[in-house]
Image (cartoon, rainbow, N blue to C red):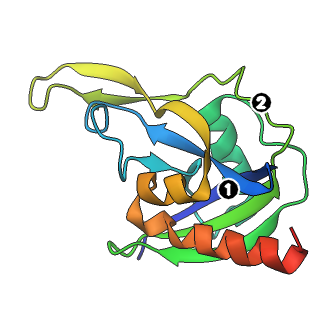
Amino acid sequence: MAVTSAGILLYRLAEGEPEVLIAHMGGPYWAAKDEGAWSLPKGEYDPDSEAALDAALREFSEELGVPAPDAPYAELGTFAYSSGKRVTVFVADGSGFSLDRLEFGEFELEWPPRSGRTQSFPEVDRAEWVRTDAARERLVKGQRPALDALEKHLAEAGA
């Protein structure tokens, strides 16, 4: 069975252009990478026991250490990675969302590999508001179609 994830794509309009909130993946593998090393706040869930939006809100809070904005969310779609993983993305206007109080969640990993030592690393190590063209280069490949869906969503809303 394919891995199922859910995430949140916050956007805001800056000088009439959309910006999106993306997060740089934490840990030693991603430390020196930029292109293709960013993600929407998202995570895995079991669709038999949790609704996708509930999972997306939970994962947002776990990764960034603050609750997602209290805003209306719309489902942008479900996007498949080449690995078969599927991520359902929800969108909301995050205009008032501040990056000032983020406290990134952590995970444990044996590092260096085969050393027998376990270290803690942040799930993400920074988050930024970026224009969609910059986000397209920085996001992992499987999440880039969500930007196309966002653009369509905004055009339909007249934004």
Front position in the image: 56 or 149: 149
Is 80 situated left or right of 42 in this image?
left
Q: CA distance from mark 2 to mark 1?
A: 15 Å
Is 54 situated left or right of 69 in this image?
left
- Asked which secondary structure carries label 2, the reply is loop
Q: Residue furthest left?
A: 114
In the rendered image of this protein, does residue 143 appear above or below residue 111?
Answer: below
In the rendered image of this protein, does residue 123 appear above or below residue 89?
Answer: above
Tag 2 residue: 98
Front position in the image: 60 or 137: 137
Q: Residues within 10 Å of mark 1 (few under 14, many from 20)?
A: many
Residue 9: give x, y in percent of width and height. Answer: 67, 56
Residue 72: give x, y in percent of width and height. Answer: 90, 59
Mark closer to the chain start, 2 or 1: 1
Q: Amino acid at mark 2?
A: Ser
Front position in the image: 154 or 58: 154
Location of residue 98 by image quarter: top right
Front position in the image: 143 or 42: 143
| Image quadrant occupied by the N terminus | bottom left
Q: Residue at x 63, y 57 (%)?
A: 7
- Asked which secondary structure carries label 1, the reply is strand
Q: Residue at x 53, y 73 (%)?
A: 145
Tag 1 residue: 9
Is residue 3 something that shows in the picture?
Answer: no
Is residue 25 something that shows in the picture?
Answer: yes
Q: Residue furthest front?
A: 15
Q: Residues within 10 Å of mark 2 (few under 14, many from 20)?
A: few
Q: Residue at x 73, y 49 (%)?
A: 57
In the rendered image of this protein, does residue 153 appear above or below residue 103?
Answer: below
